[in-house]
Amino acid sequence: MLNHITTNQCRMLLQEANFIKKQYPKRIKEFQEILKEDRSLIEMSVDISAKISTNTGGHTGEIKDLENERIKNQILIRNLKTEILYMDNRLLQIKILENMMIRLKSMQVQCIEQTYFERKKPLQICQKLYISRSAYYRYLNKGIEELTKLYNQNIVSDAETENEEK
């Protein structure tokens, strides 16, 4: 999934990451509160069942209500657990995405440095050959080999003129 990703998708995922990071603590608190409620309901149902075992009265309605409430809480707990797992999964994917962004930025810097040096080299050649940039790019269109030949000829001709002057 993350191998072929566009910048728009990247932005959307980062927005989702920020949203999830904000929602994550709220959801965990909600989960903990429901767990506390569930534990208190279990304690209450145990107390009521103990009372019923000693006293067979009309408390069965209370037990059924407590059991229904407990079942609702268990469903909520299950839903929150799956949501938290989903958030964990998304946060992991987002960490991977952030690492990819860091790598892409470093690759971009390397690419810029490489193009800078590629652009700097022709300027050095132009200075050594005493030719204009436009002439250099005309030669470049013909091929780098011809340019190197011209460069070598210029060096040879400079050496010959120096020998003749001596």
Image: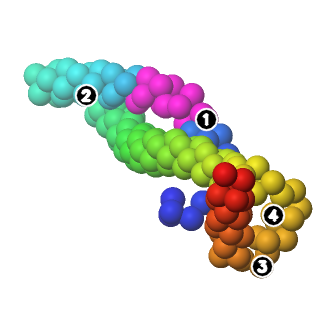
Q: Separation of disc 3 and disc 4 at Cα? A: 10 Å
Give amino acid for label 1.
Phe
Circle on res. 42: 2
Query: Element under label 1?
Result: helix
Residue 32 visible? The answer is: yes
Kind of element beneath mark 3: helix
- Residue 116 % position (x, y): 67, 47
Please say whether residue 90 is one of the residues in the magenta stretch: no
Nearer to me, 32 or 131: 131
- The residue that mark 1 highlights is 19
| Predominant SS of the magenta segment | helix
- Mark 2 vs mark 4: give the one in front: 4
Magenta segment range? 18-31
Structural distance between the alpha carbons of marks 2 and 4 = 85 Å
Whichever of callouts 2 and 4 sits on the residue coming sooner in the sequence is 2
**Residue toward you, 107 or 27:** 107
Say which residue appears at 25% left-offset and 28% top-offset: 42
Residue 32 at x, y percent in the picture: 37, 25
What is the spatial separation of the Cα atoms under label 2 and label 1, in whole angstroms?
34 Å
Give me the C-alpha separation between circle 2 and circle 3: 85 Å
- Quadrant housing residue 134: bottom right
Residue visible at 68% across and 69% down?
153
Residue 138: which disc?
A: none
Q: Which residue is mark 4?
A: 136
Quadrant of the rendered structure where residue 19 is? top right
* Residue type, numbered disc 3: Lys
In front: 14, or 104? 104
Dot 3 surroundings within 10 Å: few (below 14), some, or many (20 or more)?
Answer: few
